[in-house]
Image (cartoon, rainbow, N blue to C red):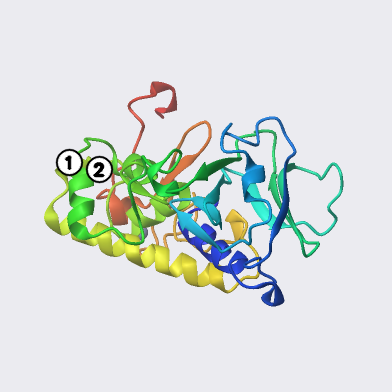
Amino acid sequence: MPELPEVQAHVERLSRPADEDGFAGSVLSKFTPITFTALKTATPPPSDAVGTPLERVDRRGKFLLLRFGEITFVVHLMQGGRLVPDEKQSAKPRNGIARWSFDDGRALLLTEAGKERKAGVWVVSGDALGQPPLDGLGVDADSVTVDALTSALRAKGTRLNTFLRDQHGIAGVGRMLANEICHRARLSPFASTNKLTDDQIAELHRSIVECIAAALAFERGLDRMSKSAERPGAVHHRKGEACPVCGDTVKAVEYNAYEVDYCPTCQTGGKVLADNTTSKFLK
Ligand SMILES: [Zn+2]
């Protein structure tokens, strides 16, 4: 799944003017939902933005915000979504979810690979940040302060990895960043958020900043959004490989849809984690 750094680098690409292959300044001529589930809102109608130039593309959490004056299209890519220039503009584009057509003859296509159809578009008028689906998000992970992070952590008694992925505590972190942040901070992914010390929280904050900065630097070097397997990391999806810090073998707690990867020596005092909430995963 694209996370904060991938979405951030992509909104920067899209916000460039047309002569730099971006879309800022291009005037919307039509919005076309391609699947039945593409459009998540009934009002205002997307046609309210027709005739208006795209001012810029912003990001909030993992959402992209296409700003057309009063109207904002809020886009969530979910697992396999991409928002890409639509070169062919075919009637039935492969994996197509929705299309924005512009007066200059170009178009942007929202695609979603895989069988799940969860990516979607919300059309909102006025203050987009104060309305669904953005209004319940926590502070963006790239701008959270130590104090705000401390409050958010202590307000919940949950596992650290779960907290990081939950968009209501801080926003923008997904599975990969959560694994990498816990590793860099030398904290167990199962540490209780309300039992972390001030020193541990300071280390966690530093780790969040550094992991996002590194991922963003990588992503800004590309001319399109990376695939998850391309992204550099220490532990994420590296079960069985050597930890680049200490050489111990990276371990994983596996769930149906994802895995929590960690280094026992760096993060858990050598302890191997088992998920005690789902006993079938105990080994
Ligand atoms: Zn290690």
Quadrant assignment for the C terminus: top left
Q: Residue furthest top?
A: 279
Q: Quadrant of residue 160?
A: top left
Counting the numbered discs, the total is: 2
Q: Residue furthest bottom?
A: 19
* Badge 1 element: helix
Whether residue 1 is visible, yes or no, is: no
Where 183 sits versus 168, above or below?
A: below
Task: Give the residue at x 41% y 63%.
Answer: 212
Residue 242, position as x, y percentages in the image: 45, 59
Indicate the quadrant of ligand 1 in the picture.
bottom left
Q: Which mark is residue 194?
A: 1
Residue 57, position as x, y percentages in the image: 55, 60
Mark 1 vs mark 2: give the one in front: 1
Callout 2 amino acid? Ala
Mark 1 closeness class: few <14, some 14–19, many ≥20 residues within 10 Å: some
Q: Is residue 57 left or right of residue 117?
A: left
Task: Give the residue at x 28% y 57%.
Answer: 186
Q: Quadrant of residue 43?
A: top right
Residue 249, position as x, y percentages in the image: 42, 53
* Badge 2 element: loop
Distance from the alpha carbon under mark 1 to that under mark 2: 9 Å
Task: Give the residue at x 82% y 45%.
Answer: 93
Residue 273, position as x, y percentages in the image: 34, 39
Decide: marks 1, 2 in contact (CB < 8 A)? no
Q: Nearer the viewer, residue 52 or 54?
A: 52
Q: Is residue 252 left or right of residue 269?
A: right
Q: Nearer the viewer, residue 157 or 118?
A: 118
Q: Is residue 234 left or right of residue 112?
A: left
Whether residue 130 is visible, yes or no, is: yes
Which residue has dot 2 on it? Answer: 191
